[in-house]
Image (cartoon, rainbow, N blue to C red):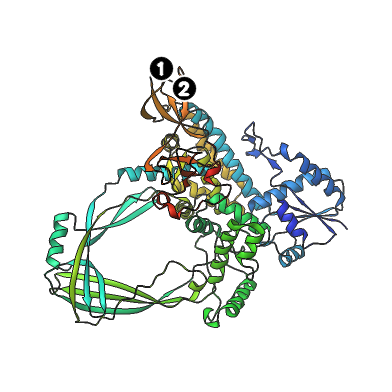
Amino acid sequence: MKNLVIVESPTKAKTIGRFLGNDYEIIASMGHIMDLPKSTMGIDIEHDFAPDYQMMADKKKIISQLKASGKAAENIILATDPDREGEAIAAHIKEILVQNSKSKTQKFSRIVFHEITKEAVEEALKAPREIDDNLVDAQTARRVLDRLVGYKLSPILWRKVRRGLSAGRVQSVALRLIVEREKEIGKFKKEPYFTLAVTLKKETGETVFELIEVNKEKIEVNEKLKLYDGEYSFSKTIINSESKAKEIENDLKTKEFVVSNVVKKEMRRTPPPPYTTSTLQQDGARRIGLSGRKTMSLAQKLYEEGFITYHRTDSVSMASSAVSAIRNFVEKEYDGKYIPAAPRFYKAKQKLAQEAHEAIRPTNVGIKSTAVSGQLGAQHAKLYDIIWRRAVSAQMSDAVTESTVVMVDASNGSYTLKANGSVLVFDGFLKVNPLALNDNRLPEFSAQEKLNFVSAMSEFHETTPPPRYNDASIIKALEEEGIGRPSTYATIISTIEGRQYIERNEGKFFPTTVGTAVNDFLATNFSTIDDIPFTAAMEDELDQIASGEKKWSPVIKEFYTPFAKTLETVGEAARVKIEVEKTDELCPQDGGHLIIRVGRFGKFMACENFPECKFTKPLVQETNMLCPRDGGKIVFKKTKKGRRFYGCSNYPKCDFAAWKIEDIKNPKEVIVKKSEEEPQKVTE
């Protein structure tokens, strides 16, 4: 009996091949083998939006191999990934092989596993099932919906904004988040305010206290702004002038200070749950500096090599066998006090989380990151390390801290001061997963104790506008608003970045003039679909299709009917003018001003009299900083992959480069690693 196992990737095939014997042939489909055509829309709107899936031209060789092996096999086992995408790939492979085979005894089965280990694969082979048509329908609905939006909207953008532009259902809402945030930052009015700190002394040392009340009135006030994607809270004090701050500062020098209250409290800190796709991408950005796309690429390899469980999941639960293994590991490696009396169980916050799946965790808790580094390299090891630490710490004891709050009165309540202290009593899960927690040990204070004045200092501040999005915060916002699904976040961001609708600067996202123009046009003319509530509701409906609660074609029809009417009326909409950034530099050919434009490969300078004058030149964006090596101007550059960095304008004579401004100010700390992302490898 010959068994054919079909997976997506060669790495996955190789890993599975280590577990199965000679009775199994394993082939990789290299992802999808069928898709909608590139040259036409491929959707039959008149016949329930039937998709015209075709065999992909660049997969002819693989399809031939699948057909040949399929004919010779008695059992065909479809072992693609355990999600909608994997289910759709399995369905398309079966469709092609059934058409190709004349055997009536040939059997097809579908197996899924969430980790590529010998045990998991063997268990999956014992429990084969049919292809889940509901999951396939949900994937079809998503593909059809996105094709309809992209195919119908993009030509309108060509006519009304600029040729070559394109739009996507979910990407447009992500773009809107970034553009609206930029507008909110522009509208924000900064307000000055001052804080005051007083240093008081006792025999055992000095302590800095914060002024919190003047005449029993709290000086800190909190304000909220309504933003496009929620609320933004910020604080300030009622001390809004330097003269007022100095007046209080001088008055404090004349007062007597008495401790009014000392409160000590034990605080327990519970470990966070193991990673989901979303939280892994967020921490990949925060802790390692990776884009969502890079995080998912590294995680894919870790999964295929058998190091971690499936990395596309919104569940925070772990298999009971994994929980037991982690608890045994912690007890053996550290001590019994580091494991709680009972295992920890976590519940997902998302209402549609697939609890049958597992959170992302190591398949073998005994494998450390050093083993991964030796096999796959440093970047994979770093990502594996945070996955390992998060999963292990999730089953460890609480961390215990002792919190101390000391209140001080000046002149019977004219001023109230406060000092906070915190000391780690028991590290608990922090032993494995340390999270910035530093001891701030205060001296022992007692009520009614008098303290001596040492100094008072006021400090100027300004209220800060809402922060720009970065990789972590945009993923968090998309998840909270129900836009897209965790497995699509990386693609959403890379798509609008690739279209030059946004750009990165020191890890933050800025909309380009083209991105702003596209957003404004869509928000004005397609407000129903280019908005958070609609997109989130559509995601819910797609999930209902996956669960079998709804049929996919009526859902698409319900969307398309009003969408088509809007398309008809938009033809009368005014053309959007893209704002251009004019420079003081003149064109050497006709004397016109050079302006900054955005093309396929980024920004460049061109004559304002285009198309009459076709003069262009590269845009060199300078900073006001000088190279610490040779004094040349520091300019913005990009790697081959589009990542921005700072480099010396005298390259290649001087190859100084840095990722951040801080690295230029502290050149001794700059360490540029030899990798594909290394700035020196960039061609001018």
In the image, is 95 to the left or to the right of 193?
right
Q: Which of 259 and 566 is in front in this view?
A: 259
Work out which quarter of the rendered image holds the N terminus and state it. Answer: bottom right
Q: Find numbered disc 2 in the image and state the secondary structure of the residue it sits on.
A: loop
In the image, is 5 to the left or to the right of 315?
right
Q: Distance between the residues labelled 1 and 2?
A: 9 Å
Residue indicated by mark 1: 590
Q: Residue 615 carries which label?
A: 2
Relative vertical location of residue 12 with respect to residue 265 in this rendering, above or below = above
Choose the circle earlier in sequence order: 1 or 2: 1
Q: Residue at x 45, y 18 (%)?
A: 613
Which quadrant of the view contains residue 115? bottom right
Q: Residue 420: percent from the left, percent from the top?
A: 30, 72
Relative vertical location of residue 623 with respect to residue 357 in this rendering, above or below = above
Q: Residue at x 45, y 21 (%)?
A: 610
In the image, is 160 to the left or to the right of 232?
right
Q: Nearer the viewer, residue 144 or 488?
A: 488
Q: Is residue 547 visible?
A: no
Q: Nearer the viewer, residue 188 or 319?
A: 188
In the image, is 190 to the left or to the right of 124?
left
Q: Residue 382: percent from the left, percent from the top?
A: 56, 60
Q: Nearer the viewer, residue 187 or 18?
A: 18
Which quadrant of the view contains residue 54? top right
Count neighbours of disc 1 (C-alpha within 10 A) and say few if under 14, some if 14 to 19, many if 20 or more.
few
Count neighbours of disc 2 (C-alpha within 10 A) and say few if under 14, some if 14 to 19, many if 20 or more.
some
Relative vertical location of residue 347 with respect to residue 99 in this rendering, above or below = below
Q: Residue 77: percent from the left, percent from the top?
A: 78, 55
Cβ–Cβ below 8 Å for labels 1 and 2? yes
**Residue type, mark 1 in image:** Asp
